[in-house]
Amino acid sequence: MATRPTNLNCETAGAGLEFARRYSALFVNRLAYTVQSTKPADNGKHYYYRPKRDRRLSVGIIRNHLNGLVTIGLYSLNPQTQRSKWVAIDADYENALEDLLKLQWELRQDGVESALERSRRGGHLWIFMGQPLLAQQCRIYIYNLARRLRVPVKGAAGLAEGIEVFPRQDQLGPGEFGNAIRGPLGVHRGAGKRYWFYGADYNVNAQLRYLERLKKIPEDDMRRFIQGMEMPEEFRPRPRVDLPPFDPNRREFRILDYLRPARKRSGNYWTRCPSCAEQGHDRSGDNLAISVADPRLYRCWAGCSKEMIRAALGQPIRIKRTV
């Protein structure tokens, strides 16, 4: 049956430690996590941060998450194994649910069961593994599926809107965290609502039973799914470029010559992303982070590439051609 988001004050059956342990078995692949701020920033957003205390995720913290006392973000990729217990496909754009339903139907043709979770603007499609599988294999499978179905992927071919796949990386180095996604069945602080999975009644126990019954992908099946496949060229990570030490006297493109930072926080300037602005997004004016220490390093947290940002500023990146 279809489910709906519920208000923060809706009774959630007082989830106990048993529920937290079952939740951990489904979703926790490493003990690092983030917490969503209960107080909004000046722009109204509730940001996620890594906690200074209780840095290791415990069943007690998960229980508080299920009871709406805190909202946690989960990391898919464990850097010690480079494996993931689940894949989440995040779609947050107009008609996003249509694309998620298309992906869900196609996954079913491979015998893969997935769970669709509603979000504020779209939804998240979750796929679970029988045991943690190599993140690279999981990503090859999903990205080839998206390409075959012509589902837009954020950042590919200059797209500012499209699906995002968690894990976002094939592998992580020591001490790296990757990208976290809001843990399911918790309360979204910005919306003040709890978003449930379709297919089960809207209480924690029924939701967990539904997720536990889903067929999990064994490693042999994943190898079979991706046999003969590789990551499509347009989705491959770009090789890392090591920049020389920053020299403010060197003549080169300076993004701060074209943008005025709105504020300074956590070692970055924050301002409106010009590429987002062209598309009518980034109303809060803080999608673009620019390193204070080295302004050559900047990133749009909505997924716009450097090429898109430079083009929006009227300063396109020149492509060096070889003869």
Image: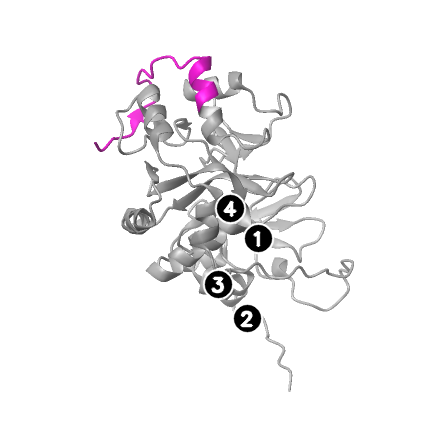
Who comes first in sequence, dot 4 or dot 1?
Answer: 4
Comparing labels 1 and 3, the label whose residue is closer to the camera: 3
Q: Residues within 10 Å of mark 2 (few under 14, many from 20)?
A: few
Secondary structure under tag 3 reads loop
Q: Does the magenta stretch include residue 3?
A: yes
In-image side of 168 versus 174 (left or right): left
Q: Distance between the residues labelled 4 and 1?
A: 11 Å
Who comes first in sequence, dot 2 or dot 1?
Answer: 1
Q: How far apart are marks 4 and 3 (CA)?
A: 31 Å
Who comes first in sequence, dot 4 or dot 3?
Answer: 3
Comparing labels 4 and 3, the label whose residue is closer to the camera: 3
Q: Are marks 4 and 3 in contact (CB under 8 Å)?
A: no
> Residue at label 4?
286
| Residue type pointed to by label 2 | Pro
| Residue type pointed to by label 1 | Arg
> Residue at label 3?
232
| Residue type pointed to by label 3 | Pro
Badge number at residue 316 = 2
Q: Residue 143's quadrant in the figure?
A: bottom left
Magenta stretch: give its range: 1-22
Who comes first in sequence, dot 1 or dot 3?
Answer: 3
